[in-house]
Image: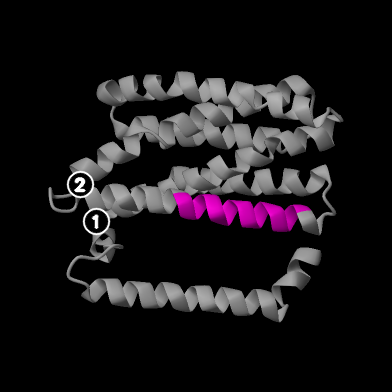
Amino acid sequence: ANAAASLVRPAVWLSLLVSLAAWVALVAIERRAENPVFPVHLFANRQLAVAFGITLGAGIGEASTVFLPLLAVLSYGVSASVGSYLLLPLVLAMAVGSPVAGRLLDKLGSRVVILAGLVIMAAGLIGISRPGPLWLFIVCSALIGLGLSALLGAPIRYITLNETTAADRSAAQGMVTTFTSIGQLVAAALIGAVAASFGETAQGYDVSFLGIGLVTVALVFV
């Protein structure tokens, strides 16, 4: 209820309108630019458009991990320091998963690795949004890390290298970074807003992680 009420406030919807107008202006300007910073023509390639969308989702998932310690504090009553240490399973999973994803990329191809990463991350996000024992929280954190390792590393960049000409490769790589950053910013804002609407309780974060998990499921079908 509080989240819906906040959307009708002038400070919120005016900011959204300005943002929308800025995006429209950006696309219009970049279409005519000789050397565009935001090369809109790359979206004509379906593979690149899908890759950028998945990158956006990966950025959203990555930003959500920042809130895991706070979720642990609110859900399990651990101290802030212990909550921070509970990020270690996710970090270790990413450290192990990144080179494994790179190896599998050569053997299985980018499609299989990215689909596996999305499914694993979705399972972790949805699982962690459900109240359960602490061990389940740790396992789901590790699953999120494994999923992210397949989405933030080589597979997406492999697609951009293979789907662009030599002239567009640097720009395409830059777009991957751009959409990752956009996802991170959007997730941070939305999770903060949803959590605040629930009064900084665990329920607000549970809803946020569930929502991001469902977005990740949608990306599987995309």
Eyeballing the image, is 111 above or below 32?
above
Residue 126 against residue 208 in the figure, above or below: above
| Residue 1 visible in rendering | no
Q: Quadrant of the N terminus?
A: bottom right
Which residue sits at x=42%, y=36%?
Answer: 151
Mark 1 and mark 2 in contact (Cβ < 8 Å)? yes
Q: CA distance from mark 2 to mark 1?
A: 8 Å
Q: Provide the secondary structure element on which disc 1 rests.
A: loop
Observer-nearest residue: 77 or 146?
77
In reply to whether residue 186 is colored magenta, the answer given is yes
Q: Front-most of 193 and 216?
A: 193
Report whether 111 appears left or right of 167.
right
Image height of 155 relative to 212, above or below: above
The residue under the point 25% across, 61% down is 44
Is 209 contained in the magenta span? no
In terms of sequence position, does the residue under pointer 2 or pointer 1 come before the other? 1
Q: Residues in magenta? A: 181-195
Is 104 left or right of 95, judged from the image as shown?
Answer: left
For disc 1, the marked residue is 45
- Amino acid identity at mark 1: Asn
Amino acid found under the numbered disc labelled 2: Glu
Give coordinates of residue 174: x percent, y percent: 31, 50
Q: Which residue is mark 2?
A: 163
